[in-house]
Amino acid sequence: FFFGLPSSTMMQDSHSISSAYGTYYNVPVEGEVQQETLFSKFSKVAVGVLVGAAVVATTMTVYVGLQDAETEFETQSVFNLLTRPTLYGGARPTLQPLEARVAGVDIPNAKRVEIALQSVYGVGPKIAKDILEATGIDPDIRAKDLSEDQLTQLREELNKPDYVIEGDLRRDIRMNIARLQEIRSYRGIRHRMNLPMRGQHTKNNARTRKGKRIAVPGKKK
């Protein structure tokens, strides 16, 4: 069979098959060699070049537009952003001040700095209190009221090697768990099985480590 036609029919009337199917399916007919002409090759290359140029031009236009918008936003003062009217003549809604960024983390503005610092992974109540004592910052001040010098002091204090926070702490924990699993200790095996490793009962609870229940088909209640 050849496209639903018997081979004998194809051999008897090959030219009719060519005229009926060759145009749509590009079926080569016996005795006829179909070669791609130089003009068709050149046209395909030209179309590809034009499409590539259009994509590059569109990408550059979008990139330049984003850069201009970012530059315009940075040149505007906070006062202008808060007081400039909208296009419809109404007052611009009040913008919340930007959150302070410490150790690569945005700390909440409305909280006391002693509590806000605990948003950093690896900083608890004790370390937050030690940092504030070392920098001489009042722990009752709100994060939004911190000056730029105080934020700089907090960043420099957290960058000291005395504190293991954020990415470094996550990496250390991940490596410790991998080491326990590699030596096949009891804790490592429990980690691998997603079970608690400190002696807790697992008959009834432990759903945090186990995850959601999985229904077993055919099990009697």
Image: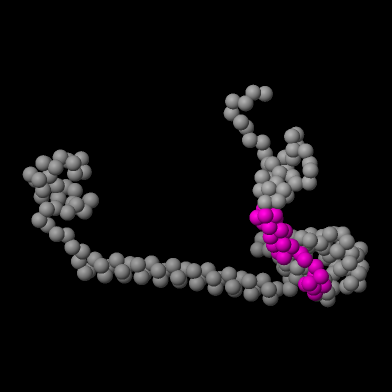
Q: Quadrant of residue 95?
A: bottom right
Q: Residue at x 83, y 65 (%)?
A: 144
| Residue located farthest toward the top when viewing the structure as drawn | 220
Q: Position of residue 43 (x, y in %)?
A: 27, 68
- Is residue 178 in the magenta section? yes
Q: Image check: 144 left or right of 26? A: right
Tell me the quarter of the image containing the N terminus. Answer: top left
Query: Foreground: 200 or 130?
Result: 200
Question: Main SS of the magenta segment?
Answer: helix
Query: Foreground: 116 or 176?
Result: 176
Q: Visible in this render: residue 4?
A: yes
Q: Position of residue 205 (x, y in %)?
A: 75, 37
Q: Position of residue 127 (x, y in %)?
A: 86, 64
Tell me the quarter of the image containing the C terminus. Answer: top right
Query: Foreground: 188 or 77?
Result: 188
Q: Residue at x 72, y 40 (%)?
A: 207
Q: Visible in this render: residue 148?
A: no
Q: Quadrant of residue 152?
A: bottom right
Q: Residue at x 91, y 69 (%)?
A: 133
Q: Position of residue 215 (x, y in %)?
A: 62, 32
Q: Residue at x 20, y 66 (%)?
A: 37
Q: Image check: 208 left or right of 218? A: right
Q: Image check: 209 left or right of 27? A: right
Check the image and report above or below for 57 versus 27. Answer: below
Query: Foreground: 1 or 111?
Result: 1
| Residue range of the region highlighted in magenta in the rendering | 155-183
